[in-house]
Image (cartoon, rainbow, N blue to C red):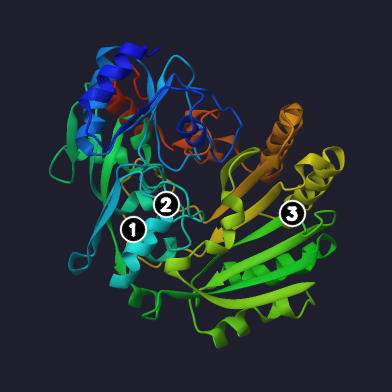
Amino acid sequence: MASLTFLSELGNSLSSDSRVIADHDSPEFAASMERWSNYGLKIPSAIIQPASEQDIVQAAQALLKASIPFVPASGGHSPFSTIDQGGVVLELNRYKGVEVDASNNRATVKGGTLMKELQVALHPHRQFAAVGNMTTVGVIPYYIGGGISAYTPFVGHGAENIISAKLVTAKGELVEVSETRNPELLWGVRGAGQFLGLVTEVTIKTSPYTLLGNDQGQRMCGTYIFPSQQADAVLAALRPIMESNEYVSAGHLLIAMAPPDFKHQALIAAPQVFCSAEEATKLFQPLADLGPIMQTLEPSTFENHSDHLAYMCAKGDFKRFTQDGLIGWNAENFHQLIELHAELVSNCPDAALTSYTLEWHTPSKAHREKDTSFGLEDISYWLNLASWYKDANNHDLVDSADKKAQAIMRRGTEEQDFISYTNTSRADPISYRYKGANRIERLKALKEQWDPTGVFTKEFL
């Protein structure tokens, strides 16, 4: 545990814009403890907010020397960025920024920069990059943990686009990694960086909007809401969109309770396609022909990529986001998923905001960086389980439903092919999260070299 004397001395040694918050009754501490989810939330002895890279290094060195555990936090979405009284949180929201080098198609992202901030920084340069679907997620943890994106068909996953990075090691040293400096560690950072150090900066590849087929960074986004009884017809209408060789698309098919009263289950098809409005109308016509309860088709730009999902960024309550890669999917499994969701909400009305989603993106048309520690570059379908409830007494019931949902969508798949997205779950076996014995052995060797005592978790030790 960090003593008040230690924290006071540390605070005096950092720059004037940094903060060390140790008063648990202060408004600042309360504000910092407001996170995306209260599931598994722990109360640290203090929250340290460094204002510069040097502050981060200095704080990490002091904590390491005093044998005080710490975890970094950016957007506050990760269930792994919380720690109990024995340790402290290094909150990076005072150290952020994006430096765009459009002429070389790259951008350098610092500290606690959030997804929306990256989008806003790139937009004036008519550049885009791999981004996630929530505006308040931290860019760096998203990239070093994999980075699934609607833009994957154009540029690959986030991890594939890391050109270089800086990280604080378990020895408290600031190390640079690139293709020429510590290249094996760069490979590890591209998908497992969270286990190898505290990443303070990444330089990522960016691309001009023209790669998307226009100079506005635009795509067409549809929303089609149906009763769940129309599942077979909806799946049949969606499959040609998902598998199209002509149009690049991404999207979600949600099983959710329909707003505003959240009393009736619905299927929400939300396809996105990179083409003109006329082409999108034609491509999505089979969905419109099914007579949806509600439908919209509107343009959206990279700058506003996931603004429509702002409600999902609300803080508080109990939320869990679990993501499994799927080799493929079939209608029978999806029907059982619908039934499970209905059963959950019937038995636990508190979980009415829970949704189960099939996410997809069409296969990549771009040259891909295949040699990453992430290793899931060829997965085009994902099961997203977004649990949301308010009563802590429902933890076990909702967790049980999540496990059943995973089992349902994995039916027909050999266990050796099970895939768990490493940035949302660390409970599943390593072999689910990182595929291939050679990849795992390389990561174990990196862990032994750079973090043999497990400062950044015990994974791979």
Earlier-in-chain disc, 3 versus 2? 3
Q: Is residue 324 left or right of residue 345?
A: left
Mark 1, Cα crowd under 10 Å, few <14 / some 14-19 / many 20+, is some
Earlier-in-chain disc, 3 versus 1? 3
Distance between mark 3 and mark 2 Cα atoms:
28 Å
Q: Amino acid at mark 2?
A: Glu
- Judge whether residue 234 can be spotted in this image: yes
Q: Are marks 1 and 2 in contact (CB under 8 Å)?
A: yes
Residue 157, percent from left and from top:
40, 54
Element assignment for label 1:
loop
Q: Quadrant of residue 447?
A: top left
Q: Is residue 186 left or right of residue 30?
A: left
Mark number displayed over residue 446: none
Earlier-in-chain disc, 1 versus 2? 1
Mark 3, mark 1: which one is toward the viewer? 3
Mark number displayed over residue 368: 1
